[in-house]
């Protein structure tokens, strides 16, 4: 069985981390599976690839805070780069001949770069299944509905896609209702739940020894995801930390993210100064290990980080971004309302209040603090639905071969008379 996976990567590391987690789980659970991943993530080579997974690196496109798409590295125009990417994707589909095409987030891809590939699969490989994977929240309903209407995404879901898998729950955000899915699309929708993450590769004891943290010292992990717009979170945390009593024994691990601009990273290092209680890092492909070892997590509200915090059952203070989309702000607000963590609106950050909230969270006894029993079965449910579709594809291709035979039989019979 073969799955072609398209990862929508134009901002941060969220999409590629989510799609890699899904690919790894599918490979663990479905025998004799091969996956070819298509992605423009500049950090793709920094992740471990499981056996059965290979990738084609697409030229990078970047979507800044304005939402406008630009070429990240190549000295080419946007349209030229999109054309190049589109041709690479189509070539991969023609040569790989997938049984299923799993598309992340955008029905026609970034700047409609999947259009030719989707038309090819629809016409030349009609048995191949097309599946759209949506995280819980894309943007505000007003923005998302307008974008989908403008680009014909609703029509694409009705005509080309066999299933829409939502890795979220309607209790947090009713994706289908908020984004006004038609009855025809609703029949294809499957809510899978949030994606529980596997335990990290290192034990808590190993991490604390690596960071030279004593048993009585609390560890706070600060993570702004990819880091492209994470400076404000890190700066707010360091400002709150500066207000702490001088005798505090808090150890802080700040993982800035590989996409944080160099000048901002230098400001972080300068602000941390020579404080031996602050450790600065750039990137890890095993964030889960550090979340498990932390007493408290301070982060943005990216889908993957939130899933990791919930999987590790860790107290957290969330400072969501509000640009280029409202996704994080909505997720943080809805989950905080359900009691899953503490959220602070980015426009209402007061350093003294943040300091007090940090101290309050550290004083609370470790316990299962959820007020809401959230569904974290996203990965097994995605695997379940994809397995069924792969089986259907296999059966349809066998039937297709079988029904080709009768066209040759009559001439053989006549020839034997």
Image (cartoon, grey):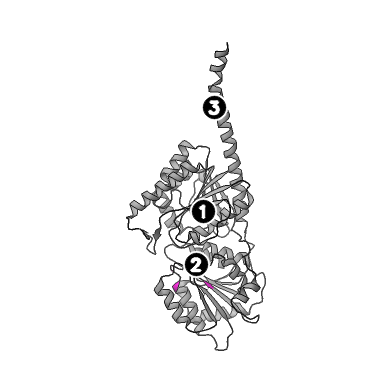
Q: Element under label 1? A: strand
The numbered mark, 1 or 3, whose residue comes first in the sequence reads 1
Tag shown at residue 58: none
Q: Is residue 321 left or right of residue 30?
A: left
Look at mark 1 in the image and give the residue it sits on: 134
Q: Which residue is mark 3?
A: 404
Classify mark 2: helix, strand or loop: loop
Q: Relative to 236, does residue 80 appear above or below in the rendering?
A: above
Q: What's the CA distance linking mark 1 and mark 3?
A: 37 Å
Magenta span includes 226: yes
Secondary structure that dominates the magenta span:
loop
Magenta segment, which residues? 222-231
Q: CA distance from mark 1 to mark 2?
A: 19 Å
Residue 109, given in percent of the width and then of the height, sits at 43, 50
Q: Residue 253: x percent and y percent?
A: 54, 75
Q: Identify whether 43 is placed above or below 248.
A: above
Q: Residues within 10 Å of mark 1 (few under 14, many from 20)?
A: some
The residue lying at 47 percent from left, 40 percent from top is 121
Residue that carries the numbered disc 2 in the rendered image: 225
Q: Do callouts 1 and 2 mark residues in contact (Cβ within 8 Å)?
A: no
- Secondary structure, mark 3, is loop
Instruction: Select label 1 or label 2 by which is in front.
Output: 2
């Amino acid at each position: 069985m073969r799955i072609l996976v398209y990862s929508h990567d134009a901002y941060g590391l969220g999409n590629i981390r989510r799609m890699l987690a899904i690919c790894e789980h599918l490979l663990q659970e479905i025998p004799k599976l091969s996956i070819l991943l298509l992605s423009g993530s500049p950090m793709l080579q920094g992740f471990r690839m499981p056996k059965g997974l290979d990738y084609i690196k697409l030229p990078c496109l970047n979507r800044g805070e304005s939402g406008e798409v630009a070429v990240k590295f190549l000295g080419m125009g946007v349209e030229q780069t999109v054309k190049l990417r589109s041709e690479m994707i189509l070539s991969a589909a023609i040569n790989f001949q997938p049984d299923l095409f799993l598309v992340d987030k955008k029905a026609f891809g970034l700047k409609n770069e999947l259009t030719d590939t989707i038309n090819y699969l629809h016409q030349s490989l009609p048995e191949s299944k097309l599946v759209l994977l949506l995280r819980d929240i894309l943007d505000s309903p007003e923005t998302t509905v307008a974008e989908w209407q403008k680009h014909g995404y609703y029509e694409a879901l009705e005509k080309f896609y066999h299933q829409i898998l939502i890795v979220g729950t309607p209790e947090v955000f009713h994706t289908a209702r908020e984004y006004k899915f038609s009855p025809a699309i609703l029949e294809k929708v499957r809510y899978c739940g949030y994606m529980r993450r596997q335990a990290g590769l290192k034990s808590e004891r190993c991490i604390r020894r690596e960071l030279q943290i004593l048993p009585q010292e609390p560890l706070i992990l600060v993570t702004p995801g990819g880091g492209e717009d994470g400076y404000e979170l890190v700066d707010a945390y360091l400002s709150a930390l500066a207000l702490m009593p001088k005798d505090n024994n808090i150890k802080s691990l700040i993982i800035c993210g590989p996409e944080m601009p160099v000048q901002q990273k230098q400001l972080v290092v300068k602000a941390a100064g020579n404080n031996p209680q602050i450790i600065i890092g750039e990137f890890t492909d095993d964030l889960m290990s550090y979340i498990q070892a932390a007493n408290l997590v301070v982060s943005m509200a990216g889908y993957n980080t939130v899933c990791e915090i919930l999987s590790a059952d860790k107290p957290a203070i969330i400072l969501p971004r509000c640009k280029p989309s409202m996704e994080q702000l909505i997720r943080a607000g809805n989950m905080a309302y359900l009691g899953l963590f503490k959220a602070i609106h980015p426009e209402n950050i007061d350093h003294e209040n943040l300091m007090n909230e940090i101290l309050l969270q550290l004083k609370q006894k470790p316990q299962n603090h959820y007020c809401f029993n959230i569904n974290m079965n996203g990965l097994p449910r995605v695997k379940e639905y994809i397995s069924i579709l792969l089986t259907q594809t296999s059966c349809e291709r066998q039937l297709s071969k079988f029904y080709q035979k009768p066209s040759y039989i009559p001439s053989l019979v006549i020839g034997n008379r």
